[in-house]
Image (spheres, grey):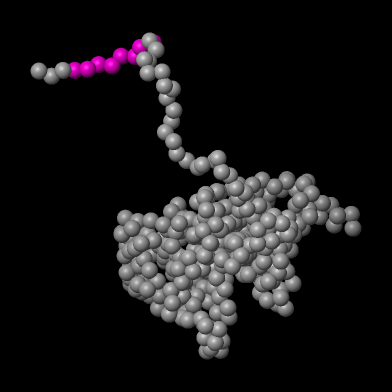
């Protein structure tokens, strides 16, 4: 004999007087510390707004200088004792944001600062996609010093595929690993790399393995972060690119729990010999913890032109709209921000992003 039970709604009070409460979980807001990434996004917004004015105008130096000037100004208000460890170059090569320059308002913690006011100066100058304004900071002594070696072989992939790839593997093994991890067919896996003659063999092997290819002319910070982001249309970043950009990318991917690896790749014998004298090796695979030692790093980027990761700056009659990503590794938070800027506000005028209506009126009166 089968017994059936029925449950009917009742207006009678429940005997158990304990109040129902949702299950516990989520961030522990009893301990809240300042997230400097939220200060840093104002820095990258300033750089992006100023640099985006130069989109397609054919002047990469002018675009870069505009972004540097704006970013340097806003950095002076960030509560930290920062030192630029990866910037625009050595002191005699760059008037601002040079390696070793002190930035911040002089309060707070001592921090390493890695900055690229315009990752993709040529992209901006020629109106192409993928340009960003980027900054990352970490506690003093945390960020890798590449010394004289300006290039490295790189690999970047999202968290889900981290255990399936390695820079020591063959190209074919890494593509198969990504396909397995992401549950894709190999011919649906997209590999992004810089379009350079040095990548001819890498490109050939990726094609022979069956992967789709996305070639970019510049901007491998955007490519690395996009490869680590599940919602983009790229799955794996491979190839040789700038070492400073590699360190910046590593800070972002550490925040995301993704995988980034690098291996130094000197350009010539002179660079190689100088690096050997300083103790650098070229067969060592640098993991994300080697490039960014601290577990509490901050990263912010704002789109200058449209890309796989972020939209670029959009100008209108009253101001502009910018799109940013803001991350902190200690909390694991990743924020996407859409910011509406108003020309009439003094802060924009101070960083050199002026109201175009006033410029037009001024030229009329002259």
Residue occupying the point 28% across, 16% down? 7
Residue occupying the point 30% across, 14% down? 8
Which of 357/308 is in front?
Answer: 308
**Stretch of the chain drawn in magenta:** 4-11
Residue occupying the point 90% across, 58% down? 366
Q: Residue 37 in the image: x percent, y percent? A: 61, 53
Q: Residue 309 in the image: x percent, y percent? A: 52, 56
Which of 232/155 is in front?
Answer: 155
199 left or right, relative to 59 = left
Q: Residue furthest left?
A: 1
Q: Residue furthest right?
A: 366
Q: In this rendering, does residue 306 appear at all?
A: no
Q: Residue 242 in the image: x percent, y percent? A: 55, 73
Residue occupying the point 47% across, 41% down? 26
201 left or right, relative to 308 = left
Residue 206 is covered by the magenta coloring = no
């Amino acid at each position: 004999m089968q017994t059936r039970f029925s449950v009917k709604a009742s207006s009678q009070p429940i005997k158990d007087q304990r109040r129902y409460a949702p299950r516990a979980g989520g961030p522990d807001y009893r301990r809240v510390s300042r997230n400097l990434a939220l200060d840093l996004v104002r820095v990258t917004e300033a750089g992006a707004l100023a640099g985006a004015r130069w989109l397609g105008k054919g002047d990469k130096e002018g675009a870069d200088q505009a972004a540097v000037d704006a970013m340097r100004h806003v950095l002076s208000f960030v509560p930290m004792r920062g030192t630029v460890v990866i910037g625009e170059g050595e002191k005699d090569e760059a008037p601002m944001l040079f390696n070793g320059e002190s930035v911040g308002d002089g309060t707070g913690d001592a921090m390493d600062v890695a900055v690229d006011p315009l990752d993709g100066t040529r992209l901006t100058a020629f109106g192409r996609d993928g340009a960003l304004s980027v900054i990352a900071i970490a506690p003093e002594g945390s960020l890798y010093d590449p010394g004289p070696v300006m290039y490295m072989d790189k690999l970047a992939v999202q968290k889900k595929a981290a255990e399936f790839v390695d820079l020591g593997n063959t190209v074919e093994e890494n593509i198969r690993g990504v396909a397995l991890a992401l549950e894709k067919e190999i011919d649906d896996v997209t590999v992004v790399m810089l379009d350079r003659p040095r990548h001819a063999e890498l490109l050939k092997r990726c094609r022979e393995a069956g992967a789709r290819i996305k070639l970019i002319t510049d901007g491998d910070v955007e490519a690395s972060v996009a490869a680590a982001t599940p919602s983009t249309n790229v799955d794996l970043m491979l190839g040789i690119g700038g070492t400073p950009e590699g360190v910046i990318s590593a800070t972002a991917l550490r925040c995301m729990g993704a995988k980034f690896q690098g291996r130094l790749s000197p350009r010539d014998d002179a660079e190689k010999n100088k690096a050997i004298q300083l103790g650098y090796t070229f067969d060592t695979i640098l993991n994300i913890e080697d490039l960014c030692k601290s577990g509490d790093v901050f990263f912010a980027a704002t789109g200058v032109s449209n890309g796989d990761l972020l939209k670029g700056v959009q100008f209108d009659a009253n101001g502009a709209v910018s799109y940013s990503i803001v991350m902190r590794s200690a909390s694991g938070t990743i924020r996407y921000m859409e910011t509406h800027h108003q020309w009439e506000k003094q802060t924009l005028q101070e960083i050199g992003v002026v109201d175009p209506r006033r410029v037009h009126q001024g030229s009329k009166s002259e």
